[in-house]
Amino acid sequence: MALFDQSAVLFVALLAMLLITVELGTRLGHRLSVDSDQLRQEQLVAARDAIGLLLSLLLGFTLAMALSRFDQRKQLLVGEANSIDTAIVRAELLPDAQRGAMLGLLHEYVEARIQFSEARIDGRVIDSAMARTKQLQCKCGS
């Protein structure tokens, strides 16, 4: 799983594998003299075009799915920001003794959420940020 955590390394590894595969296929094609048979050449061109079409459809569907997830994530983020803003406005209406404590907790909550969003794919940071968020939610609720 360490290879999948490093996108640049994964890209280079996949690119190298692709180049090696293309080179081996080219050498094998020359050795088997694929270009001499016209029928075989037409079949290879048709297969290549079909694979290109399939990959373009796959890419199109993947992007469509990613776009809907991006929009959903953006809506959730805006909703959370609005909820935090509402909580801050309501906390400012509390008496002075409770206002400072509540605003301090809300500030810590925002810091925990920022830590969560900056974690990307680091599981330990995500888990600690989520635990801190839940702990702060329990403190604010009581």
Image: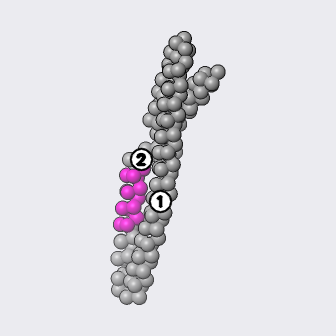
Q: For the residue marked with disc 1, what is the amino acid?
A: Ala
Q: For residue 142: magenta?
A: no
Q: Position of residue 44 (x, y in %)?
A: 41, 79
**Which of marks 2 and 1 precedes in the sequence?**
2
- Label 1 sits on residue: 64
Q: Residues within 10 Å of mark 1 (few under 14, many from 20)?
A: few
Asked which quadrant contains residue 24, the reply is bottom left
Pick the front one: 50 or 66 = 66
Residue 65 visible to an observer of this rendering: yes
Image-based side of 98 in relation to 142, left or right: left
Q: What is the chief secondary structure element of the magenta stretch?
A: helix
Q: From mark 1 to mark 2, how far is it between C-alphas?
A: 22 Å
Asked which quadrant contains residue 118, the reply is top left
Which residue: 64% across, 21% down?
Answer: 142
Pick the front one: 35 or 47 = 47
- Label 2 sits on residue: 7
Q: Are marks 1 and 2 in contact (CB under 8 Å)?
A: no
Q: How many marks?
A: 2
Which residue: 55% across, 18% down?
Answer: 94
Which residue: 59% across, 23% down?
Answer: 140
Q: Residue furthest front?
A: 93
Q: Secondary structure at mark 2?
A: helix
Q: Secondary structure at mark 1?
A: helix
Q: Position of residue 122 (x, y in %)?
A: 49, 37
Q: Which residues lie in the magenta part?
A: 10-23
